[in-house]
Amino acid sequence: MLGSDAIKRINQGIGWRADGHSLESKFPGYFVEAQDDLEMGKTLPKFLLREDQTLSLAIGAHTINLPIGFARADDERPISFPVTGSTRPQFLQQKRIYKDAVEAYSNSDFNTTGFKVYVIRNSVIDFIINAMSATTFTWNYYKYGDTFALNTENEWLAHKSAKWWLIGEAGFRIAYDLRDDRAMALFDGMRQRGRAATFADILAREDESGPLVMGANL
């Protein structure tokens, strides 16, 4: 769904207003605001996940810039690098505190390429020790969706259920500012159903491999 089509759905919900009315130019800002709020949630939808992405660490360096639009790391698929003579990658442990990451290495480690951990800082991924050779890492991470625009379809609007979550959220905010109780109720129902359907899809994907068993991943 294009952004312009999402705007049309808003116009229908606030009383079938004709396209191009005087308030319509304000509506994209509501979508940007709504999307920002949705992407600050504790659980991000899977369609924002970027899988098997590569990171290139230059020889002599110990940091890599975070990707543009980086939201958060995927705990299920941390950073790894290939091991010579093996098809099994070496996974690194993410440390939340820089001091803990430094202390994970002994003094002798700083003269090797034996990467063990990393820490995500404000703008870089820090592997603590310098690379003795150029190294390519692989990981998953969540990326913020593209900004709402009238002539494009971003990740939210492309998703079958999440588009209604976003439209409902933006529409509710618009209806609230218009003091339109009936439209508020309509868009509130839309956002609730869209949210429920989006997270039902996440749960269904997690259940594809069988029921959850306490301690199975320990």
Image (spheres, helix red, strand yellow):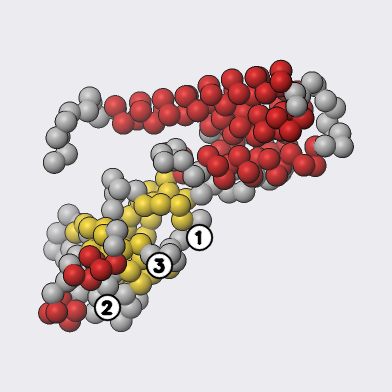
> What number of labels is visible?
3
- Is residue 98 shown left or right of residue 154? left
Instruction: List the residue tagged with mark 2.
Output: 130
The answer to whether the residues at label 2 and label 1 have Cβ atoms under 8 Å apart is: no
Instruction: List the residue tagged with mark 1.
Output: 68
Quadrant of the snapshot with the N terminus? top right
Q: CA distance from mark 2 to mark 1?
A: 23 Å
Residue at image coords 64%, 24%: 187
Q: Secondary structure at mark 3?
A: strand
Q: CA distance from mark 1 to mark 3?
A: 11 Å
Q: Position of residue 190 (x, y in %)?
A: 59, 23
Instruction: List the residue tagged with mark 3.
Output: 124
Instruction: Check disc 2 and give the amino acid type.
Output: Asn
Q: CA distance from mark 3 to mark 2?
A: 14 Å
The mark nearer the N terminus, 2 or 1, is 1
The mark nearer the N terminus, 1 or 3, is 1
Give the label, 1 or 3, closer to the camera: 3
Instruction: Check disc 3 and give the amino acid type.
Output: Val
Of the pair 218 and 155, the residue shown nearer to us: 218
Q: Position of residue 189 (x, y in %)?
A: 59, 20
